[in-house]
Image (spheres, helix red, strand yellow):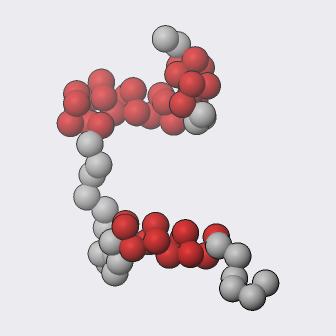
Amino acid sequence: MRVAGIAAELGCHAKTVRWWLHRFNELGLEGLEDRPVSGRPRRITEAERSRIVGLVRQTPPGV
């Protein structure tokens, strides 16, 4: 597939697809893995975050 077709199928920008393709070409499959990030570690897990987001989306009681 061409870059434009991949971007359309994934719902992202063509520049993003090119960025990942370059990273893959340089590093192979390892280039597609997440890299360590700088900064303070998260205080809550992804599951806790998802639960909070779900609660926020609910209609408040009594409304």
Q: In which quarter of the image is the C terminus?
A: bottom right
Which of the two residues, 56 or 7, is positioned nearer the viewer here? Answer: 56
Q: Is residue 27 left or right of residue 52?
A: left
Single out the residue that lies furthest toward the front.
62
Q: Is residue 22 visible?
A: yes
Q: In this view, does 11 lie above or below 53?
A: above
Give the quadrant of residue 43. Answer: bottom left
Report the residue at 46% width, 71% height from top. Answer: 51
Q: From what the image shows, is residue 40 above or below residue 62?
A: above
Q: Give residue 28's quadrant in the image.
A: top left
User: Splitting the image into 4 quarters, where does residue 11 fall?
Assistant: top right
Measured as percent of width and height from the top left, residue 19 is found at 44, 34
Q: Looking at this rendering, what residue extends furthest in the bottom direction? A: 62
Residue in the image at 55% along x and 69% along y: 54
Farthest residue, direction right: 63
Q: Measuring from the top left, give residue 7's x and y in whole percent.
A: 56, 27
Is residue 45 found left or right of 8 in the rendered image? left
Q: Identify which residue is drawn at 58% across, 17% down.
A: 5
Label count reads: 0
**Which percent across, then down, holds residue 37?**
31, 62
Residue 15 visible, this orientation: no
Is 54 displayed left or right of 32 in the figure?
Answer: right
